[in-house]
Image: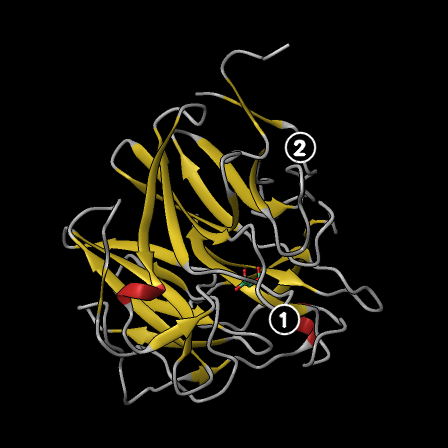
Amino acid sequence: MERKNFCKNPIIRSIYTADPAPMVSGDTLYLYTTHDEDELIKDFYTMFDWRCFSTRDMVNWTDHGRIFSLDDIEWADDRAWAPQAAERNEKFYLYCPVHKKDGGMAIAVGVSDRPEGPFKDLGHPLIDEGDWNDIDPTVFIDDDGQAYLYFGNPELRYVLLNEDMISYDEKTGIVKVPMTEESFAKGSHDTGTSYGEGPWFYKRNGLYYMVFAAFAENVHQEHLAYSTSKSPTGPWKYGGVLMTEEGGCFTNHPGIADFKGHSYLFYHTAELPGGSLFHRSVCVAEFHYNEDGSIDTVPKCEGIEGI
Ligand code: FUB
């Protein structure tokens, strides 16, 4: 029987979605996602656009459709991968990894006057190091107004965004975070740590959190883990596993938001009919912080109560 006032996982059932990125603006939670196409090209991720959904009660969702796509980015040709959005000075910024026409991955920025888009590309990449590390941006504006954009697979890197949110402090440049076991635990990804990709950066009660998709030793499926720091630029201290390998697909991807007094972890699985590592679906779980700011492992769940 359908439960009333209950948001059943996966949240979105009309299309395959992945890489959830929640953003709260006013009394609404906006959920930006990637979109796994039904028909695969070369049996790989086939992803051309970004989608947006919104809710005021975590149960009833409005589908805003395609809000930004590769067609809007003249210099990109493939891989519309994991985005994150930010609001500043009444404008909205969507940071998106893409594959460039001239090769390699880079991070694009779409700008809009409205959270639900449509977004307009800057016309050039924001981050373009010419290597494949330039994916999975996560953005956070600190209380002092400094905005940070972290990103990367297999290394975690960051830039200090300028107030315009579409450029960064070139003097500081692109900073490489030391990939140590103390920061990210021993694991099986390329740096020898568990840090894989999909960072999600935020602050709560004065403590900075870096949640990420991780590879345990000898395990070829991602789990979610987190590290914390007393400063926005580290050093990071490994905190533990946030979600074990779940949901039947190789990747997972965290998105965290506090909304109307509740804390939510968005993630993805392959649980819709026809699901696979290239046909994923966005889910949500409610969780709680311990007194000291630590987080216990969050079980994958059937869904959440509405608010
Ligand atoms: O969805 C494409 C890529 O897979 C993302 O950028 C990664 O985080 C992983 O979910």
Q: In what element is the residue under mark 1?
A: helix
Percent of width and height locating residue 75: 31, 78
Residue closer to the observer: 104 or 25: 104
Quarter of the picture holding the N terminus: top right
Percent of width and height locating residue 290: 60, 40
Q: Is residue 83 above or below residue 7?
A: below
Rounded to the nearest angstrom, the CA distance separating label 2 from label 1 is: 28 Å
Please name the residue shown 57% across and 65% down the image: 41
Tell me the mark number nearer the camera, choosing from 2 and 1.
2
Please name the residue shown 31% across and 64% down the image: 71
Q: Provide the residue designation for mark 2.
A: 301
Please name the residue shown 64% across and 37% down the image: 272
Percent of width and height locating residue 180: 66, 78
Which of the labelled discs sits on residue 183, or is there none?
A: 1
The quadrant of the rendered image in which ligand 1 is seen is: bottom right
Q: Quadrant of residue 250?
A: bottom right
Q: Is residue 206 above or below residue 95?
A: above
Badge 1 density bin: few <14, some 14–19, many ≥20, Cα 10 Å: many
Q: In this rendering, would 16 be left or right of 231? A: right
Quarter of the picture holding the C terminus: top left
